[in-house]
Image: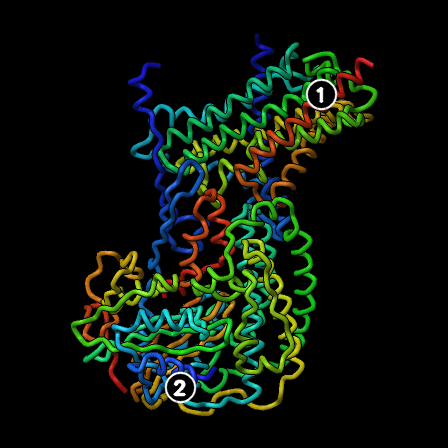
Amino acid sequence: MNTSQTKDICTEEFLINMGPQHPSTHGVLSLELKLDGEMIRDCTAHIGYLHRSMEKLAENRTYTQFIPYTDRLDYVASMNNNMGYVMAVEKLLNLEISDRAKYIRVIAAELNRIASHLIAIGTFAQDLGAFATPLFYCFREREKIIDIFDQICGNRLTYNYMRIGGVQFDLPKGIDEKIKKFIKYMRSKVDDYDWLLTYNTIFLARSKHIGLLPKDLAINYSVSGPNLRASGVKWDLRKDEPYLVYEKLEFDIPVGENGDSWDRYKVRLEEIRQSLKIVEQALGALPEGDPTVKIGRIHKPSPSEIYLRTENPRGELGFFIISDGSAYPYRLKIRSPSFSNLAVLPELVKGLKIADIVCILGSLDILMGETDR
Amino acid sequence: MLMMLIAGIAVLAFISASAMFLIWWERKVSAHIQSRFGPMRVGWHGVLQPIADAVKLLLKEDIRPAEADKLVWWLAPFFAVVPPVMAFAAIPFGKSLIPKDLNVGILYIMAISSVCVIGIFMAGWGSNNKYSLLGGMRSAAQIVSYEIPMILSMITVVMHANSLSMQKIVEAQSRHWNILHPNMLLAALVYTIAATAEVNRAPFDIPEAESELVAGFHTEYSGMKFAMFFIGEYTNLFIIAAISTTLFFGGWHGPFLPPVVWFLSKTYLCIFIWMWVRWTFPRARVDQLMAFAWKVLTPIAFVNLAITGWLLLK
Amino acid sequence: MRTNEIFMAIKTDFPEARQEEETGAVIIPKESLLKITQYLKNHRLAFDNLHCITAIDRAERVELAYTLYSISEHHGITLKIYLTAGEENVASLAELWKSANWLEREVYDLFGVIFLNHPDLRRILNPYDWKGHPLRKSYSHPEVSIKPRL
């Protein structure tokens, strides 16, 4: 080879557009990756492909009319979104709800948290290449929760169940037996996941020490939910700023040690166990009464503003509502957990392999519906 | 000459029937592992599903990316499907049921099946797609690395049988199977792992890693070209299972039943184990895969080879 | 710590801060934003978490609302800045809290508030070539229909 030829040979970075159509970007996320072979040099996230301008829509809907829209924020945990929103409006109106409604809300929210974490775990394992098997197992269990919700409110995915001042319907007859049966069933299944997946050597090799998110960085990025707890921060709004009846219920906050992908997975798995515990207690303590709404649908709160955040499966969902005395919110801001959780991604992936970005993205468990709103 | 032609046609017919059966079986096995039924509509428990799939793939539009390297792109599927078919020439189905008993049979099979990697790399390069290129590069690295422990584990068998001929290797196991020797058991384990990587199956399916590379090297292929990669993959799977049967599980030897039945049932049992693994384990990462080949498998295979040599000389 | 106590702590060091009556939010002039936020983050108040940034279009002014929390101290506060129309710019907090990076991009995208010294001030939710800032009350778009008021 002569010298003029060798001079022409050079290496260059490889630009790759991962998404918005890609099997493992969890919806329509686009990642612009600069690769050096398999190594990631730089990562830029482009979001907004699912932007529906929810906040603008809210300004033209009455407070009640906006509830179904919240279903479409985090569409795998609609109950929790419903709840966060109606609680914010109730705070704005200074409305007290009946005890039974509070307990029903807790049961619905925790069941939906389990359903959401099941999807998170299933898709995370799928992203690691455990080809569809864990996903199907998780969906099998989730189906049972959906059946319960179907019986409670007639919907399978977008529930529109919470109402300002209560819930849409009382629990149907015989549902508590069904939920109790589910709790027993789910407990054994979570143990199954531990056996099948959690301590699998390849699974550990792929997810341990991958995507380390230190404590202070997580707080600085305003990461919340299981991702924050996996970094070792014992922070859960259900304990630290208890709402509804969470202070009366006994449960633990699982925390991780290193803040790696495996910890994030493990925290979710433990949270399923804790949620089962909460549902069991709430079901046992369910008071008599009428949880449905007895007031009109049009609310005209006096001009004020409130900010309320609740612990969603993916993190802290906040609603910042400003009223001007009319039946429509003057401004409604949705602080979605996935938005902040996703912002930390470019920080985590630099210098890792292309397979790791999929692992980290899966472990962060972002959902584009609420990221883009 | 006529006999050769008949043998050729028989082998080709067997390959397509086997590939179709394997596709159906894989779908059934995966479905039952995942607590679902799999294909149920076309024929009894969906047995005719592969035919429906084949018809669908034949009727599909053959799409070529505008910027593809035409010749390389067009040739790649042939390189993926022809070598495994050629490897059938030296597979012993029964005592006299072997297309051609080469005296270097095992060497021939290894040499031929290594050509596959060229097809995969051509597909990756020719598609002019970045995901495909990454898949092709991974595949080249992976197959070249795993060939070494694979061949080293085969050599232990060859040393026992004193021959490279597939028939001689089977005959050497007429009293007891190779797998019953401890050092052969180790060789069989090394072979199984390396062969999994050799045919790009999970947990070593990084060249087509769905979650990262969409579909890896065959992302851009559609219709019959895609089907050829598919047939090549399943034929390869049959080949590695047939080799492991021949080398470690006594080939066509077995009491009562005719040899060909013994051979096929052993082979399909091996294939079932590969399917079971595929639908159970997560995927390893590319660097972990390489490290495992060079730092774990190759040294074990070498040490095993040395021990086998010492045992034979003793 | 209660909101009032936090306000008093800020007030002693920064007399320009005042409290919004109906909401309890602390209103600060935009010039002292960087100084006050630095103080809030590094002082014993330890506001380590910038939870949310948003804006409210009040026609004559744009209000910026920063929701701050302290995970170690278990308290929170809302800082507000009034930006007069035509001067919608303010210093960026991306240096102090990394979460500000995307949150400020969102406010820029939807309200057109310019964040000075922001590392990467691009649109985030709308397409990069979008015209206008949709959450401004003056924004009009043929596809946005306003429902009759109750």
Amino acid at pointer 2:
Leu
Residue underneath mark 1: B305
Task: Tell which subunit mark 2 falls on.
Answer: A
The reply to whether callout 1 and callout 2 are in contact (CB within 8 Å) is: no
Mark 1 Cα-neighbour bin, 10 Å: few <14, some 14–19, many ≥20: many
State the residue in front, B200 or A260.
Answer: A260
Work out whether A95 lies above or below C105. Answer: below
Task: Tell which subunit mark 1 falls on.
Answer: B
Which residue is at 42% across, 26% downward? B122
State the residue in front, A283 or C41.
Answer: C41
| Residue ranking furthest to the front | C13
> Is B187 on the left or on the right of A113, as rendered?
right
Q: Residue A325: horizontal and vertical position, in percent?
A: 30, 89
Q: CA distance from mark 1 to mark 2?
A: 77 Å
Q: Residue B66: horizontal and vertical position, in percent?
A: 29, 34
Residue underneath mark 2: A92
| Residue ranking furthest to the left | C86
State the residue in front, A51 or B270.
Answer: A51
